[in-house]
Image: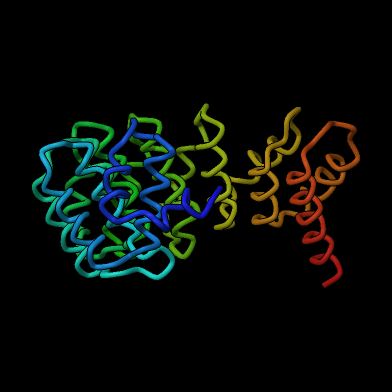
Amino acid sequence: MSHLDDGEERSTEALIQASLEGDEDDERAWAAIRALHRRGTRDVLDAALQLLGARSAKARERGAAILGQLGGGTPAFPAECGEALLDQLRREREPAVLLAVGVALGHLREPRALSELIHLASHPIAEARYGAVHGLAVLEAPEAVDALIRLSADEDRDVRDWATFGLASLREDVDTPQLRDALAARLGEEDAEIFGEALVGLAARKDPRAVEPVRAALSGSQVMVYALEAAASSGDPSFYPLLLAIRASQAPADSYFLSVLDDVISQFEQRVLA
């Protein structure tokens, strides 16, 4: 990709216009948004704030996306961005924009949005609830965890998935009976990703309800990385021979899987020698 394609030589106005092109996943539009993130200047902030007030829902989505990561790795104007997004959350009615605002607030880890995000978690449209999950998953408040527990049983697959991930992995510091029960409830999921996230989270908390599902996952015909991670977190010694059997099998596996497997086996062997 050329330096010009990175957006560094284009004006802020040109990048804003490019961000509005194409559909929701248009890569050229998102390349422009990433360039605006890196720029992180006052004129980018002002342009994004103008987008939040646009009649077009798409423009408001783009404005939220720009504000959520303005400055890239070093946030620029976080207080102003958070205030603008919170105000937008209070007055926005379009579910797609509410999703974009929730995601942006999640990037900012904006604690002032807690009550509004909890309210959004009860929105009748799943797209809006998905935004609430993103905003809540990174907040420290117990109320945020309670909302994620409720959302982990949501009827919508994507909402359930992100809420389960938030409880299992993003909030590893939290360990309550209610949270464990919520993760255990997801062990009945047919969706492999949600099941795997719940299993890893439950195993990390040394909950005995994870042991048999981990053993079954390690003994299956197609072992997934989540089963290896759950085995490592649990540390149950009965998993060690199963891990060795997986390594000894002739089943094809990609290099990432094999590296994780070797690392997990090494962890078990270090526990034996300790």
- Residue 115 lies left or right of residue 246; in this view the side is left
Q: Nearer the viewer, residue 49 or 237?
A: 49
Residue 258, horizontal then vertical, whole percent: 79, 46
Q: Residue furthest bottom?
A: 274
Residue 134 appears in the picture as rendered: yes
Residue 63 image point, x, y percent: 23, 49
Q: How is the image coloured?
A: rainbow
The structure residue drawn at horizontal position 86% and vertical position 46%, both measured from the top left corner, is 244
- Between residue 149 and residue 257, name the one nearer to us: 257
Q: Residue at left 47%, top 52%?
A: 4
* Quadrant hosting residue 105: bottom left
Q: Quadrant of the C terminus?
A: bottom right
Q: Residue at x 77, y 39 (%)?
A: 254
Tell me if 13 is positioned left or right of 217 in this view. left
Percent coordinates x, y for residue 271 in the rendering:
79, 66
Residue at horizontal 41%, vertical 43%?
162
Q: Is residue 174 left or right of residue 212?
A: left
- Quarter assignment of residue 139: bottom left
Q: Is residue 230 above or below residue 269?
A: above
**Res. 144 in view:** no
Q: Residue 61, relative to residue 115: is it above or below?
A: above
Q: How many marks?
A: 0
